[in-house]
Image (cartoon, rainbow, N blue to C red):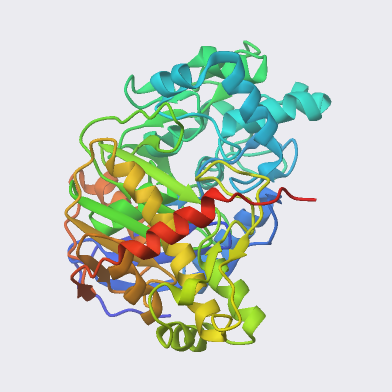
Amino acid sequence: MTTEQTPTTILVAGVDSSTQSCKVVVRDLASGRLVRQGAAKHPEGTEVPPAAWWEALLAAIADAGGLDDVAALSIAGQQHGLVALDAEGRVVRDALLWNDTRSAPAARDLIDELGADAWSRRTGSVPVASFTATKLRWLRDAEPEAAARVAAVALPHDWLTWRLLGFGPSDESPLGPDLDALVTDRSDASGTSYWSPSAEGYDLDLFEHAFARAGREATGAAPGQDGLVVLPRVLQADGTAGTTVANGTVPGGIVIGAGAGDNAGAALGLDATVGDLVISIGTSGTAFAVTDRPVTDPSGTVAGFADAAGGYLPLIATLNAARVLSSIGGLLGVDHDELARLALAAEPGAGGVTLVPYFEGERTPDLPDATATLSGLTLAGSTRENLARAAVEGMLSALSDGAAAVRRQGVDATRVLLVGGAALNPAVQAVARQVFDLPVVVPEPGEYVADGAARQAGWALSGTRPSWAAATSASFEPDLRPAVGERYRAAQALGSLPRA
């Protein structure tokens, strides 16, 4: 792939290593103009060999036309998860992803042992199955031999950055297994349950409590031989991890930024500021806001994360988002376009039909063993149109309730930014106006997580945060229908059956 450039053009790249795929964008540093992009699939499942991410990253880079003319790059990745490395830099076991709920009992144990207030005060969040600390406790108890081999704990984007820097097992990487070269950023570190956004540092006592082994932050210098579990060194928003070491796909000498968790990457890609409430509808759903102060919620509903720009990102996440539409669309034998047509043909409230969409369990509220429920069915109301609308209303009502929890933490919001794969669905846009009491803005479709990583790469390269305007696809004034949310909450209160 070729690109016309002036001699002064500087290009930066951003990577979104998400649950489902790896995406790469290459942008002009001065204007933010998209120059080219590429993508590659990730394997399905809630535990994945990290080598598959590396292969997908290299494939996505090649699909984007390579990085020969790129000056800097940064990686945003799926948050939480667990990548455990041994002293030789080898992965101890397949990585546990954020959506692997086997650690739910471990999360409950950690809360029982120290109390939700203590976790919230010390880390900004209360542990749930997604968080790294709970997966470490699960590993300690379920696979003690594997736990005993752990010499370092990283997050997905940390591990990919480390590999780009040239580190890894000696037979795979030119620089070998220097665990003290691991780096992360404050946004991703804040999703571990052992890093504090308010104190801006690791709470090593919490790490040891979860894993029963002591840890320390990587020094960035020579490998340590102290037997402590190495945790990545935390870089600030404009920090530089180092430069790439050449391999068959990636040239050497490219500046690497700090990276970010996916939601923080999206916020940076959107250039979200205080007052923006972002609703993202992808594999998971999220509602988050940018704030200038840390947030703590002892109830555990809102996670008080850090962002990728020096601020804070109070957030709720739902496990069930766009896949709710896919599931009901499959049941009805229609694609997303036809599902939207059916939903728009029904009246608000879906004739009393209400879907509480906990198909995969749920994270907000924290019900990892829950199942979905469909209620309010009558002979007159049991139509394809009402079922389609109930799917959209249920998905968005869950996110609306989560957004309300974020706002109850003293977060001021003036508008909703609706993003993600389902944001352009006309039924989603119509129902969003009816469940949110704020103006709804739909930015132009884009790879906002990768765009945020590209913006961060430019920041690391130039020392100045790039200012790239985000185009708007549509905007709507609110048309609030309180009955939709009230009916949803009534159905939610009925509960759902646990998994068999």
Residue 446, located in which quarter of the rendered image?
A: bottom left
Q: Position of residue 387 (x, y in %)?
A: 55, 77
How many discs mark residues in the rendered view? Answer: 0
For image coordinates 59% across by 87% down, the residue present is 334
The answer to whether residue 407 is visible is yes
Q: Position of residue 404 (x, y in %)?
A: 32, 47
* Closest to the observer, 359 or 466: 359
For image coordinates 72% across by 42% down, the residue present is 171
Q: Is residue 294 above or below residue 487?
A: above
Residue 311, located in which quarter of the rendered image?
A: top left
Q: Is residue 366 above or below residue 468?
A: above
Residue 3, located in which quarter of the rendered image?
A: bottom left
**Image check: 6 left or right of 404?**
left
**Image check: 80 left or right of 347?**
right
Q: Is residue 178 above or below residue 389?
A: above
Q: Position of residue 450 (x, y in %)?
A: 39, 60
Q: Is residue 22 above or below residue 48?
A: below
For image coordinates 56% across by 85% down, the residue present is 384
The answer to whether residue 15 is visible is no
Q: Position of residue 340 (x, y in %)?
A: 45, 83
Question: Which corner quadrant holds the N terminus?
Answer: bottom left
Kindly give the residue lying farthest to the front in the view shown. 379
* Closest to the observer, 71 or 448: 448
* Closest to the observer, 439 or 149: 439
